[in-house]
Structures are given as structure tokens and as C-alpha cells.
Image (cartoon, grey):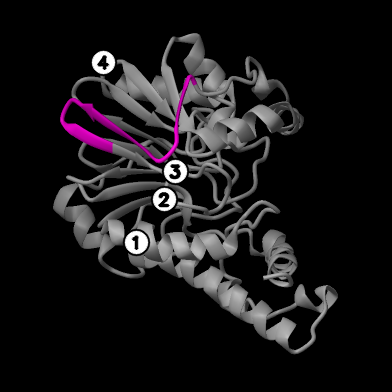
């Protein structure tokens, strides 16, 4: 059943710090597919008027969720549609477009890739086939150009026949710091705020609506993964100096249901600060990498993907902080 939250109703829901809590809103890595009629994991919901999101699984990519484990959002501006994230394969992009066409007859005019990962860019092949402009940060474009075929190969192994039609297609446009888009009734600011989860991370900020589509700068309901290239110190700094000062009332995170700043702070910034603090204490006490895997992360064990990621995250933060 489609959930519609808009205007004052959503504002009232999102100011509650536990309004969207793991398990209370249907977010569970144990649910393989919430929308069997579509390749999408879930049906798009209207978060605020004219801003929609198809919420992905809070689980790793699987055949069952077709790799839709991030949020695929779109803005119906009045003069065209702006899509945020190309999708994890050709079929997911098509499924999203099919949903858009049931909501509006406005054409998709722009696709924005939140970073250079597969779930942001592999669906570009669908949009490029339709002549839609695709925008990404220059570092994300470089990352996908370097690793795109490996990313495609891994996705094909998971999605099997569901990967059909997917090819490596990068963005048609790139930017360095910001790109301002005036379209219809919306001012859309595409911003690179600094180092975060992966190279070329961007946020899409709607200043008049006080809504940010955060991409992987912010996580909710699932544990964030720390990659080899993740700059955890830079991410903490980006959060305090640029992301939270936006003053967003509404947050559509990269993963997990739409919520407020307090919730994504809890599961992103607070988690990074906690893990870095535990590792710093461990290093200062002469601890080794072998023991670092077992630092205390129990405050976050209720999050989806905790079992897959907690020890790996600790090890990677140790390797970073050992030389800080």
C-alpha cells in the first residue's frame, strides 16, 4: 500500500526523534522485496509535495532486490522531472521511469548521480538511451570510468538475467563544487560539500523546501559501510562544517526511510565519532589490528547490515587512524 506523507503531516512525523525506527516502518533486511509487481524494491512515495522516493532495501544487493538497496528519488518540478540516481541496472531505471509516468506526463530532463558507485550509475545506460542529460561530480565520473566494468561484472553476477541491457555509461556533464538548477517551481542545488563516504559524493538541496537528498553522506536504519577510500575524518568534518549547517528539516538519506536530521546524525555522524573514538583508545593502549575488530559497537547492533559490516568497518578505521 502506498504511503503518502506530505506537508504538515510529514513535518509532524519527522520532528519525533524515533518516528522512523528500524522495524517500525517496515525497514528490514529480512524482507527480500516489498513491491513484487516491479523490479523496484518498493513503490515510490511522495515525501513532500512533488518530491518522491522509491526506498531501497536496507540490505546488501541481492537478486531478490535487484540491487535496489539505495533510494531512487525524483522531483516533479512543473517543467520536467529531475531524477536523483541512475539506478543499479538498466531494468531498475526503467522500472522507476514507469512509475514516474504514472504520476506525471512531464518528461525526465535530468538525472543526477549521487556518486560513482554502481547503484548510482549503472542505470545510466537506460537514461542515456533516451537522451536524458546525466550529471555527476567530476571525482565520481573518474571513479566510475576507472572501475565501471568491474562494478558491472559484480552486478551481473548478482542480478543474472535482471542485468540485461546494462552497460557502462558515465555522466554527460560534470561539475566541481556546485551546480544550480532552476527548473519549474524548484531551485535545486547540487553540492559537493567535501569528503564523505566515497569519491564525488554530492547532496541535492532544495532550499525553499528545506529538504536534502543526501546521497551517501547520510545513512538511516542500516549500518554505513566504510570502504578503503572512505575518509572518515573528512566525513566528520564535512558533516559539522557543511552538511548539518544546511538546516534541512527533511532528509531523504542514501539508505533508509526519509526522516529528520537528528536521526541521520544518530546513525551517521554519531556512529563515525563513536567508532573513531573506540579505535583511538585502542591504538593509544597499544592495541593491534587483530583486536581492533572487536571494539565495542554494541550501541548499533540493532541496525541492518551490522553483522556484515561492523568488524570490517573497525578494521578499516584502525588502518586509517594508525597513521593519522
Secondary structure under the numbered disc 1 in the rendered image: helix
Image quarter of residue 286: bottom right
Label the magenta part by its dominant secondary structure. Answer: strand
Residue 105 tag number: 4
Q: How many angstroms separate mark 2 from mark 4 (CA)?
A: 33 Å
Q: Nearer the viewer, mark 3 or mark 2?
A: 2
Secondary structure under the numbered disc 3 in the rendered image: loop
| N-terminal-most mark, 3 or 1 | 3
Percent x, y of residue 154: 74, 33
| N-terminal-most mark, 3 or 2 | 2
Q: How many angstroms separate mark 1 from mark 4 (CA)?
A: 35 Å
Would residue 67 be seen by someone viewing this image from the given angle?
Answer: no
Name the residue beneath numbered marker 1. 244
Q: How many angstroms separate mark 2 from mark 1 (CA)?
A: 11 Å
Is 18 or 120 nearer to us in this picture? 120
Q: Note whether 256 is above or below 127 in the view shown.
A: below
Residue 202 tag number: 3
Provide the residue span drawn in magenta. 172-188
Name the residue beneath numbered marker 2. 193
Amino acid at each position: 500500500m502506498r504511503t503518502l506523507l506530505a506537508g504538515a503531516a510529514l513535518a509532524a512525523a519527522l520532528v519525533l526523534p524515533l518516528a522512523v525506527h528500524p522495524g517500525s516502518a517496515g525497514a528490514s533486511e529480512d524482507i527480500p522485496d516489498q513491491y513484487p509487481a516491479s523490479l523496484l524494491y518498493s513503490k515510490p512515495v511522495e515525501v513532500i509535495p512533488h518530491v518522491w522516493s522509491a526506498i531501497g532495501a536496507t540490505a546488501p544487493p541481492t537478486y531478490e532486490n535487484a540491487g535496489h538497496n539505495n533510494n531512487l528519488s525524483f522531483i516533479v518540478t512543473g517543467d520536467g522531472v529531475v531524477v536523483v540516481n541512475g539506478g543499479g541496472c538498466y531494468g531498475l531505471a526503467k522500472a522507476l521511469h514507469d512509475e514516474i509516468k504514472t504520476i506525471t506526463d512531464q518528461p525526465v530532463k535530468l538525472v543526477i548521480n549521487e556518486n560513482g558507485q554502481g547503484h548510482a550509475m549503472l542505470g545510466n545506460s537506460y537514461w542515456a538511451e533516451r537522451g536524458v542529460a546525466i550529471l555527476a561530480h567530476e571525482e565520481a565520473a573518474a571513479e566510475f570510468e576507472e572501475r565501471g566494468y568491474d562494478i558491472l561484472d559484480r552486478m551481473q553476477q548478482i542480478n543474472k538475467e535482471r542485468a540485461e541491457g546494462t552497460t557502462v555509461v558515465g555522466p554527460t556533464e560534470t561539475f566541481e563544487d556546485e551546480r544550480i538548477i532552476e527548473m519549474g517551481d524548484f531551485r535545486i542545488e547540487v553540492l559537493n560539500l567535501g569528503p564523505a563516504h566515497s569519491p564525488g559524493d554530492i547532496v541535492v538541496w532544495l532550499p525553499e523546501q528545506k529538504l536534502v537528498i543526501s546521497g551517501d553522506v547520510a545513512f538511516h536504519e542500516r549500518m554505513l559501510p566504510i570502504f578503503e577510500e572512505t575518509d572518515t575524518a573528512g566525513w566528520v568534518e564535512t558533516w559539522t562544517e557543511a552538511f548539518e549547517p544546511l538546516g534541512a528539516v527533511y532528509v531523504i538519506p542514501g539508505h533508509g526511510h526519509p526522516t529528520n536530521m537528528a536521526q541521520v546524525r544518530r546513525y551517521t555522524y554519531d556512529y563515525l565519532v563513536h567508532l573513531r573514538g573506540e579505535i583511538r583508545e585502542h591504538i593509544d593502549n597499544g592495541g593491534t589490528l587483530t583486536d581492533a575488530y572487536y571494539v565495542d559497537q554494541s550501541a548499533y547492533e540493532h541496525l541492518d547490515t551490522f553483522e556484515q559490516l561492523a568488524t570490517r568497518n573497525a578494521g578499516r578505521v584502525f588502518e586509517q587512524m594508525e597513521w593519522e
